[in-house]
Image (cartoon, grey):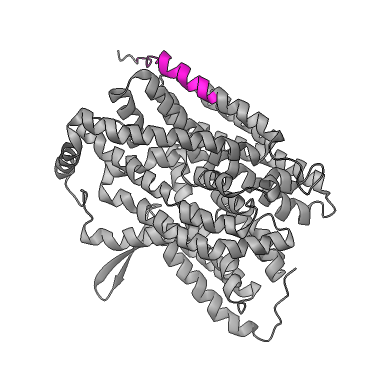
């Protein structure tokens, strides 16, 4: 008869974890009174969902970094490097490319949103094109793409809770109930304030790890030698450098991910909460510091080979590394940093999705006379529903399903790029053309991804040669071509003026 053993609880690590989790819970509830007293008296969606649009350079830096570099990033990037080697480093050029895009595009988008009181990307689209259909398409895409993203933050939290020796669903559910309560109370101010603590903790954990782990495993030379030998035993096209066939998918993944990153509701929420356009430009200059951090995080995947770490799931690599090489108190500190790194983006994501539901579905289709106070209340309830939905996905669906949906989410959210960005620089495209382009991109991207087994890249045969490209980029190309082909047939129609 086979017996199963219950993992032993690491009590020292657990108490450290509980202390820091309790600390950010208190901060989350206190945040409801932080920086209040803006231009809106009483309840208002701008106050709850955008923090009063009053966040300065430092707050925005921590908030945008906090919801861009998530718990799942800390878990998944080293796991990918551990699994496939150099190919897993595509996140580095992606985060390098994204900041010039932020510098050029986001201050203009912020200005348009601020001028007209827009809270969401779909608000911007409606104000610019006057099309309810295009507004709904952008809003629906944002909500659907965000849900699995929130679920993946729970995956990151679930991994570290398991590493503490805790079993069952109760610890994860309890953590998310606490998150739901202080997000309901404080709105965007809660994750903005907690992001300070989260980022300091993550920096400490990573900087200590990249110094101490190599010292314990024979230096960086042994780290790379061990990884090279492990990949050689695996065979195939994995290793410390990219193979020729990996270069094009690597580059297109980086480019497509960079274009999609700030189309997500949570990243745009951080942008719209800034107090002025200069704050966004400064952040585009300073945020690459996180890219350095991400490169160091990715190296943990190689270090696991030097430390002789063997895991059943690649996602367990980072927790296993810390449990093996660090004292329990520091492992608890590291795991709490990762868990808090899930709370910040999950909160912002749920707020972004709630803003979309309230402004772009509830207001136009349920109650077009909704007051600002009622808007805030609807958004609060919607944020609770979003969190519960994400939690149910993790508890009752396979993790791979959430991962597959998140990969599709990247393809889908990229299809909102033309509607949201092109109008900032080029006024010729009209709503029907953009809507048909969006539909073509969504259908092509979804069909192609499923045909490939929900993989992020697709291979094309051109002239006998095979080219592998990020599916989202291909879908975006279809989107733009359809919009450009349709537009001449609309040339006789006057485009509506923005609000």
Image vertical order of residue 162 relative to residue 422, above or below: above
Q: Does the rendering let one see residue 336?
A: yes
Measured as percent of width and height from the top left, residue 237 is found at: 20, 52
Q: Does the rendering let one see residue 308?
A: no
Residue shown at the point (68%, 69%) measured from the top left: 128
Q: Main secondary structure of the magenta part?
A: helix
Using the rendered view, name the quadrant where residue 403 is placed: top left
User: In this picture, which residue range is highlighted in magenta?
Assistant: 5-21
| Along the line of sight, the residue nearer the viewer: 371 or 292 | 292
Residue shown at the point (62%, 55%) measured from the top left: 140
| Along the line of sight, the residue nearer the viewer: 348 or 284 | 284
Residue shown at the point (68%, 87%) measured from the top left: 492
Measured as percent of width and height from the top left, residue 184 is found at: 69, 35
| Along the line of sight, the residue nearer the viewer: 339 or 29 | 29
Residue 144: within the magenta? no
Does residue 213 appear left or right of residue 31 in this picture?
left
Does residue 383 appear left or right of residue 471 in this picture?
right
């Amino acid at each position: 008869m086979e017996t199963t053993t219950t993992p032993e609880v690491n009590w020292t690590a657990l108490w450290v974890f509980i202390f820091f989790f309790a600390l950010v819970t208190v901060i989350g509830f206190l945040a409801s009174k932080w920086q209040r007293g803006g231009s809106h008296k009483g309840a208002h969606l701008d106050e709850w969902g955008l923090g009063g649009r009053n966040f300065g350079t430092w707050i925005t830096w921590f908030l945008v970094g906090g919801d861009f570099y998530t718990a799942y990033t800390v878990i998944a990037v080293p796991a990918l490097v551990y699994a496939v080697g150099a190919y897993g480093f595509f996140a580095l050029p992606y985060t390098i490319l994204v900041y010039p895009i932020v510098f050029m595009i986001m201050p203009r988008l912020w200005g348009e949103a601020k001028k007209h009181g827009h809270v969401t990307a779909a608000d911007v689209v409606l104000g610019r094109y006057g099309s309810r259909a295009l507004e709904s398409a952008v809003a629906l895409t944002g909500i659907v793409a965000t849900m699995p993203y929130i679920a993946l933050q729970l995956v990151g939290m679930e991994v570290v809770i398991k590493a503490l020796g805790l079993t069952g669903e109760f610890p994860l559910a309890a953590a998310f109930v606490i998150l739901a309560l202080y997000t309901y109370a404080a709105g965007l101010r809660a994750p903005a304030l907690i992001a300070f603590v989260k980022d300091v903790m993550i920096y400490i954990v990573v900087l200590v790890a990249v110094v101490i782990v190599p010292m314990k495993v024979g230096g960086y030379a042994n780290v790379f030698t061990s990884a090279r030998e492990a990949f050689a035993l695996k065979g195939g096209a994995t290793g410390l450098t990219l193979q020729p066939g990996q270069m094009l998918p690597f580059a297109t993944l980086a480019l497509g991910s960079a274009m999609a990153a700030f189309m997500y509701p949570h990243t745009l929420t951080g942008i719209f909460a800034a107090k002025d356009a200069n704050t966004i430009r400064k952040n585009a200059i300073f945020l690459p510091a996180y890219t350095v951090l991400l490169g160091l995080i990715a190296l943990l995947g190689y270090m696991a080979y030097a430390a002789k770490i063997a895991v059943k799931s690649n996602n367990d690599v980072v927790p296993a590394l810390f449990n093996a090489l660090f004292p329990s108190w520091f492992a608890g500190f590291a795991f709490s940093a990762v868990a808090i790194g899930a709370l910040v983006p999950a909160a912002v994501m749920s707020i972004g999705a709630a803003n979309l539901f309230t402004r772009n579905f509830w207001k136009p289709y349920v109650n077009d006379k909704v007051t600002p106070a009622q808007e805030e209340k609807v958004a609060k309830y919607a944020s609770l529903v979003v969190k519960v939905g994400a939690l149910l996905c993790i508890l009752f669906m396979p993790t791979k399903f959430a991962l597959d949906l998140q990969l599709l989410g990247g393809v889908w959210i990229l299809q909102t790029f033309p509607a949201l960005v092109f109008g900032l620089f080029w006024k010729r495209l009209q709503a029907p053309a953009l809507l048909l382009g969006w539909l073509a991109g969504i259908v092509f991207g979804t069909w192609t991804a499923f045909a490939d087994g929900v993989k992020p890249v697709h291979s094309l045969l051109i002239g006998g040669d095979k080219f592998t490209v990020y599916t989202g980029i291909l879908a975006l190309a279809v989107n733009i071509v359809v919009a450009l082909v349709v537009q001449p047939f609309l040339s006789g129609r006057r485009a509506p003026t923005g609000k």
